[in-house]
Image: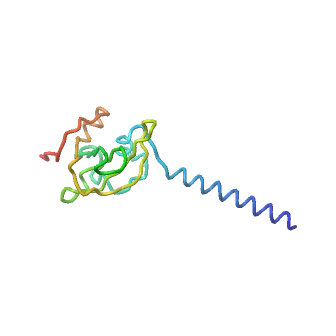
């Protein structure tokens, strides 16, 4: 009876370990194309982007370097939830193999790195022609 109890406890412990390992793996997300992942919500977005849909909005990009982060990467955002020219960013860290790992949602104290493109251009071509600075909204 004691031996069976030990075997049950060991089995339950192993099952819990496997379940927790699966949760850790599910929380990690990496992609070769972080812009696509952002626009098509291929991971759990950290904020409520695209309030007005993805069809006609401004996408924002910030190439990350030593001045904003301690790593090479890229951050994306979108205009509909920005207040007075500030907003959240979805941060992706560049990996040695060229893929990008999603890290977090954050705010940056500056928008000096800001580049933008129209989402409708990206959706029609699969590419953004990034422009520096704040978009001229017409």
Left or right, residue 2 beside residue 26? right
Left or right, residue 27 beside residue 35? right
Outermost residue to the bottom = 2
Q: Quadrant of residue 48?
A: bottom left
Residue 50 in percent (x, y) is at 30, 51
Colour mapping: rainbow
Residue 75 in percent (x, y) is at 32, 47
Task: Please tell me which residue lies in front, 118 or 32.
Answer: 32
Outermost residue to the top = 125
Task: Please tell me which residue lies in front, 127 or 120.
Answer: 127
Left or right, residue 30 beside residue 11? left
User: Which residue appears at 39% of the width and 43% of the height?
Assistant: 37
Left or right, residue 45 beside residue 16? left
In the picture, the quarter occupied by the N terminus is bottom right
User: Which residue appears at 32% of the width and 34% of the height?
Assistant: 126
Residue 11 in percent (x, y) is at 74, 58
Q: Quadrant of residue 96?
A: top left
User: Which residue appears at 75% of the width and 60% of the height?
Assistant: 10
Total labels: the figure holds 0
Residue 79 in percent (x, y) is at 24, 51
* Residue 34, placed above or below residue 124: below
User: Which residue appears at 16% of the width and 45% of the height?
Assistant: 135
């Amino acid at each position: 009876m004691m031996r069976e109890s030990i075997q049950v406890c060991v089995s339950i412990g192993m099952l819990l370990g496997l379940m927790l390992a699966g949760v850790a793996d599910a929380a990690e997300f990496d992609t070769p194309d972080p812009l696509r992942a952002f626009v098509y919500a291929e991971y759990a977005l950290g904020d409520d982007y695209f309030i007005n849909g993805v069809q006609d909005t401004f996408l924002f990009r910030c190439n990350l370097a030593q001045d904003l982060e301690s790593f090479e990467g890229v951050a994306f955002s979108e205009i509909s939830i920005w207040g007075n020219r500030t907003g959240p960013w979805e941060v992706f860290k560049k990996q040695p193999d060229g893929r990008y790992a999603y890290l977090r949602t954050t705010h940056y104290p500056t928008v000096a790195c800001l580049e933008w493109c129209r989402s409708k251009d990206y959706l029609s071509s699969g590419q953004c022609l990034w422009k520096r600075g704040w978009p001229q909204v017409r």
